[in-house]
Amino acid sequence: MLGLKSIKSKIVAFAIMATLIPSVGLGLLSFRQNEAQISDNVTLELRALTSYASREIELWIDKRVHEVYVTSSSSAVIDGLSAIYRPAPDASGRDPRALALYLRSVQEKLETILELTVVNAAGQVVASSMETTASVTLPQDWPQNSLTEGLVIEPAHWDKQYATATVSIAIPVLSYDNMLMGALVAVLDLRALQPELKSPTRSPPGEVLLLDPEGRILVSSQADAEKLKKLDASLLQSLLAQPGESAVFQGVTRPEVIGVADVSGELAITILAERDRQAVYGDWIDLRNMFLALVGALVLLMAAVAFQMGRSIVVPLKRLIRAADRIAGGDLDVRLSATRNDELGHLTQVFDQMADRLRRNHAEIMAVNEAMQQQNQVLATLSITDSLTGLYNRSKLDTILTDELARFKRTQRQFSLLMLDIDYFKTLNDSYGHITGDEILVAVARILLQSIRSIDYAARYGGDEFIIVLVETSAGLAFKTAERIRSQVENMRYSVNGSTINVTVSIGILQCRPDDMTPTSLLARADHALYEAKGAGRNRAHRAH
Ligand SMILES: Nc1nc2c(ncn2[C@@H]2O[C@H](COP(=O)(O)OP(=O)(O)OP(=O)(O)O)[C@@H](O)[C@H]2O)c(=O)[nH]1
């Protein structure tokens, strides 16, 4: 039965494998492709975010430069600075405080400017809109580079004084005759960039962050993101090593983000666009989980179907095996009725036909066997029977005498023996014919059988001679039996062709003795007693001495 169980489990295992391998294989392939596609799309979107932000920063800076430039070329600033180089006789209109007042009035009008400071060509502060000014360090090559355009003199950074991210730009101040007199330095509030970083309508989803070289958030498209922790500097370096390439990392806005970093040329600042990975892959993960659940359900369904299929094979096979076992054990009364119209049903039908054939053959064999037994019985009987009279034959007589002698020697229980001979049987034969002689032999034999007990034996010794073995009988009792036989034969009236035939027998009697060693010696003594009976005139019984 183990084999049958394994058939069932093999079918179930095959069904599971056949369902699992293609579905999971194809599913994984497809999900991997989708994942790669999603990743590519997100990377493209994040790149779009960084470039949008970069462009907007550039525009914003250009605008601010223009504003400061307009201020730097105002007569108030030019005059104020000229006064330092060429003091006028009337100093009333050239008071640096007037310039400071002017700068403050301008700064108040421009929200994104936190401070406006005028410095001379050596970088010394001449006037400022604020009481305390941010430190102004003009680079060595400033005069040359700044003649035509503004210059960032303080890259974007976190300014403790203003508690915001700032960038400082310097615009040259030229005299009316184009002499470089100094510069107008503006400290810009980068918070103003926040709404510019991302278009609320056109930008793809995601957050844009501006980071300083240490990874600290200066500005973010997400409100209040500045208060979030800073990005690990080494992570920032690795992102910047592959600008425009996406990476997954622990973000500043979410535990796990996909991000793309780039550097803004204008501000020398890192632009990081990032998006929550969970949000990106949420649908994909849901779809994957649904797919896995579906595959699981499919596997269960296929396993159940395969189990049922295996059962539908194994159960009838078990039935056939049980039936075959019964037949092998000798019980041929087995009948399985086929209920199915498939190969197993056909096999069951063939099995029934085979069992029928076996039953028939067995019945035939049994009948033949019985007939043979009967024949053997007949043969066995014939082998020990005299064919004419039905008495035991001489061969059987030898066996009987041998057995009785052995028993006598063993138990000392005597037996007696009668030897009979029909008187003048030759004359009867000659007078009435051989057939009548046979009939007389049969009639005498019948009398012998009727005269003895069931434990005694009667045998035809040969011709017209008979032997009777009387078990556990003394010579005296044997004599009585002999006399009874003799008398019955004598009284037998046998008619042939209207005339009655008188038949007599002479009987020799003996009782076994310890010196009777063989059937031959026993018979010789009996023969002698018979001879005595014949000699005494026939139709008589004579006891041996
Ligand atoms: N009908 C018939 N005769 C047989 C059979 N067997 C032997 N005989 C005959 O039986 C006769 C036996 O004769 P014997 O025993 O020699 O002599 P008897 O005539 O009986 O004479 P006593 O024995 O001296 O009285 C023979 O003639 C045998 O041919 C048999 O089976 N059938």
Image: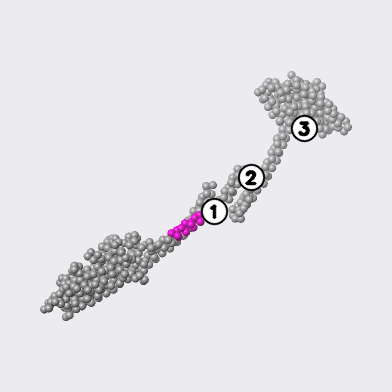
Name the front one of labels 2 and 1. 1
- Amino acid type for the residue under numbered disc 2: Leu
The answer to if 297 sits in the magenta stretch is yes
Q: Which residue is mark 1?
A: 308
- Amino acid type for the residue under numbered disc 3: Thr
Q: Secondary structure at mark 2?
A: loop
| Of callouts 3 and 2, the N-terminal one | 2
Which of these two is toward me, 266 or 431?
A: 266
Q: Secondary structure at mark 1?
A: helix
Q: Disc 1 and disc 3: Cα gap in Å?
A: 77 Å
- Range of the magenta residues? 289-311
- Amino acid type for the residue under numbered disc 1: Gln
Name the front one of labels 3 and 2. 2
Q: Position of residue 295 (x, y in %)?
A: 47, 58
Q: Position of residue 183 (x, y in %)?
A: 18, 74
The numbered mark at residue 389 is 3
The answer to if 400 sits in the magenta stretch is no
Is residue 344 among the parts visible in the rendering?
yes
Q: Disc 2 and disc 1: Cα gap in Å?
A: 31 Å
Q: Position of residue 168 (x, y in %)?
A: 22, 70
Q: Where is residue 411, by image quadrant? A: top right
Secondary structure character of the magenta stretch overall: helix
Which of these two is toward me, 396 or 127?
A: 127
Q: Is residue 169 left or right of residue 44?
A: left
Find out whether the residues at labels 1 and 3 contact each other: C-beta distance under 8 Å.
Answer: no
Up-down: is 24 above or below 115? above
| Of callouts 2 and 1, the N-terminal one | 1
The numbered mark at residue 342 is none
Q: Quadrant of the C terminus?
A: top right
Which of these two is toward me, 87 or 431?
A: 87
